[in-house]
Image: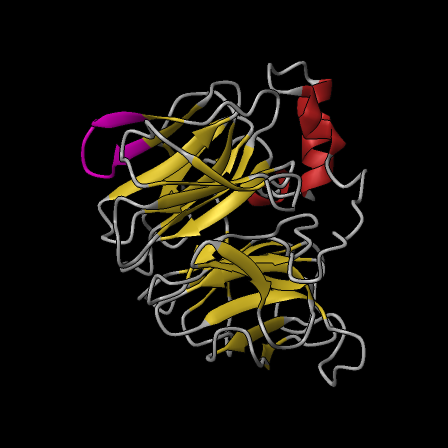
Amino acid sequence: MPAIRVLFRLVSVALKLLVAAAVAVPAVLAMADIHPHARSARPADPLLLHVHGLAYSADGRDLLVPNHTGLARFRDGGWSEVAGPIHDFAGFSLTERAIYASGHPAPGSDLPNPLGLVKSIDGGASWTTLALGGEADFHILAAGYRSNSIYVLNVEPNSAMSRVGLHHSTDDGKTWRYRAGRGVQGNGFALAAHPIDPATVAVVTDKGLFLSRDAGESFKRFDGRLAATAVTFELDGQKLRFARAIRRQMVSAALDSRSRTIVLLPPIGLDYVTHIAQSPTSPRTFAIATDRRHVYVTTSNAGRTWRQIAKDGDLP
């Protein structure tokens, strides 16, 4: 079986295998997707249900959070819903000029189900189908911030992808190339596409962090053998940021050296980080989201102070 097929299974399956193998990660990992939460009685508050992404808008004003009930945003100290269709988002990635996503359409939408790969150029107010509408639901998706490079995992064949595994497009989903993913170990949790170089992509698994310089054909281990749960490239393309599962820390790592900086996380207990985002207008500003739908923001590279802006998917 190709390595990439072993790597990328549905996340729920991956987490169960991780726990079954007695890897020292929080027990809560195996509990994802079990306990839905009711919407807050405050109509202005978004429901962050099973958060599927985290990204700052290009102007840095909005922190966007896609979930099963549309697209939420945090702006000027408060939460609101982005005006637009309430799609059930799965994969989600924001670039300098567009948002790319997948999942299922809102009730009454004329978009196909599943969405395939869709794109918005107006901040999520409207969406157009790029590829594989009615065929694919990409839960793991990453787009380069300026590179026009898109990586997806397909878990079953479709009309553009005859094989299961990692695929790559540089033309907005018109054509796709299968990528073998040689060298990756473990079960994958997330992808990150380099913001500038279309051939550089990273993956975090229950066996660590792996980096490819050849568009996913082969990967080399970039960090130790501890499970990692979230990853992003800093927007200048010089560093990776990733979260380790069994330590309360995020790591900032230079791509071209052995330099590592430990960034302390807020006290999240047995929770774990699922998404990391950097502000394009304030490079010291980072946000994280966790499996329990807590969201925090810091303006310190060392993570000395964090502000919690969501707790259990609602106001803290």
Question: Measured from the top left, where is residue 54 in percent x and y?
Answer: 50, 52
From the image, which quarter does the C terminus lie in?
A: top right
Q: Is residue 257 magenta?
A: yes
Q: Residue at x 49, y 60 (%)?
A: 93
From the image, which quarter does the N terminus lie in?
A: top right
Image height check: is 58 above or below 305? below
Depth order, front residue of 260/149: 260
Task: State how the image is colored.
Answer: secondary structure
Depth order, front residue of 230/224: 230
Question: Measured from the top left, where is residue 49 in percent x and y?
Answer: 70, 50
Question: Measured from the top left, where is residue 257 in percent x and y?
Answer: 18, 32
Name the residue furthest front.
Answer: 42
Name the residue furthest bottom.
Answer: 110
- The reply to whether residue 3 is in sight is no
Q: Residue at x 54, y 73 (%)?
A: 124
Q: Residue at x 25, y 49 (%)?
A: 283
- The reply to whether residue 283 is in sight is yes
- Quarter assignment of residue 262: top left
Image height check: is 151 above or below 30? below
Side of 217 where 81 appears, left or right: right
Task: Count the marks.
Answer: 0
Q: Is residue 38 magenta?
A: no
Side of 191 where 310 appears, left or right: right
Depth order, front residue of 279/313: 313
**What is the span of residues highlighted in magenta in the rendered image?**
252-262
Question: Measured from the top left, where is residue 82 in percent x and y?
Answer: 57, 70
- Quarter assignment of residue 290: top right
Q: Residue at x 65, y 71 (%)?
A: 116
Side of 68 where 282 appears, left or right: left
